[in-house]
Image (cartoon, helix red, strand yellow):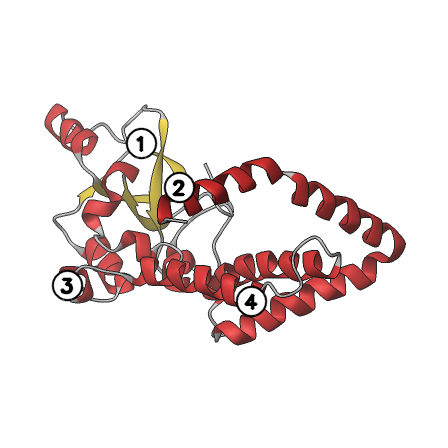
Amino acid sequence: MDGHGYVTQLLNAAHAKFGHAMAKFIKKLVKAAAKDRDTVVKQINRHIAHFRKRAGVDANNGAEVRVADTFGLVYAAGRLAKDYEVLPSDLNCLAAALACYRLNRAHHRHLSPFAKQLPPIGDRIRALLDDDATLRASPKGKPSARAAHAIAEANVIRGSCKGEDELWIRPSAINQVFPDWSAQKDSDVVLSLLVHNGKKLTTKRQVEPKGKHILMYVFRMGVDTPPRLDL
């Protein structure tokens, strides 16, 4: 059989069985959980911990642990599916999950030569906040028409909320301001400085006097834990 024939046969077989394994797996998982939920939870947590160990994740890096545990949960599902005889007993779920995890990490850590030379992102955020050239918003004041136009057009703005100085960056410009944003946005440094609400990394601020609150990336220096969304 040539390569094309093999791929066609594989696709046809996958299409014929599509959804069957998942339905069988869910049925057996629900049955096992109904019988002894604690044991099932312990099995899942044990498999996730094993994946984390084999992946070599730094337990002190919260962002990395969260990513690894996402793939670890997939590995745990694969292991349970083997126990329930849904997947072949000789399928190496760990090798498959680790391969996907490492591809994911390689993608996120890939930076251009320019980005690799950039200073730490925390230093860059501080520099923008301290830079006198960064425009300052005055939502309660009455700036001149020229100043109001400049603020409306600015992508990076110095603002304040509840007496705290903040750096506001428009979502449309975040990758321009920080070329390595895709690799940095989930880092502990960024998450500790970013005013956010869970998975939603943007929050609303009033940029223009009497204007609407709009979504911005809001950084506040000296924040120990990410605060809740405050409008």
Q: Amino acid at mark 2?
A: Thr
Question: According to the image, label 1 marks what residue?
Answer: 140
Q: Earlier in the sequence, mark 1 or mark 2?
A: 1
Q: Earlier in the sequence, mark 3 or mark 2?
A: 3
Question: According to the image, label 4 marks what residue?
Answer: 94
Using the image, tell me which numbered label, if any, was put on residue 113.
3
- Position of 211 with respect to 188 (left or right) is left
Distance from label 3 to label 2 (Cα)? Answer: 28 Å
Expressed as whole percent of the image width and height from the top left, the position of residue 71 reads 53, 59
Expressed as whole percent of the image width and height from the top left, the position of residue 141 reads 26, 31
- Position of 33 with respect to 12 (left or right) is right
For marks 3 and 1, give the one nearer the viewer.
3
Residue 224: in sight, yes or no?
no
Query: Is there CB contact under 8 Å for labels 3 and 4?
Result: no
Label 1: which secondary element: loop
Distance from label 4 to label 2 (Cα)? Answer: 35 Å
For marks 3 and 4, give the one nearer the viewer.
4
For marks 3 and 2, give the one nearer the viewer.
3
- Sort mark 1 into few (<14), some (14-19) or many (20+) by Cα contacts within 10 Å: few
For image coordinates 26% across by 57% down, the residue present is: 125
Q: Nearer the viewer, residue 155 or 110?
A: 110
For marks 1 and 4, give the one nearer the viewer.
4
Q: Amino acid at mark 4?
A: Leu
Question: According to the image, label 2 marks what residue?
Answer: 202
Label 2: which secondary element: loop
Q: Amino acid at mark 1?
A: Lys
- Sort mark 3 into few (<14), some (14-19) or many (20+) by Cα contacts within 10 Å: few
Q: Earlier in the sequence, mark 1 or mark 4?
A: 4
Q: Nearer the viewer, residue 175 or 120?
A: 175
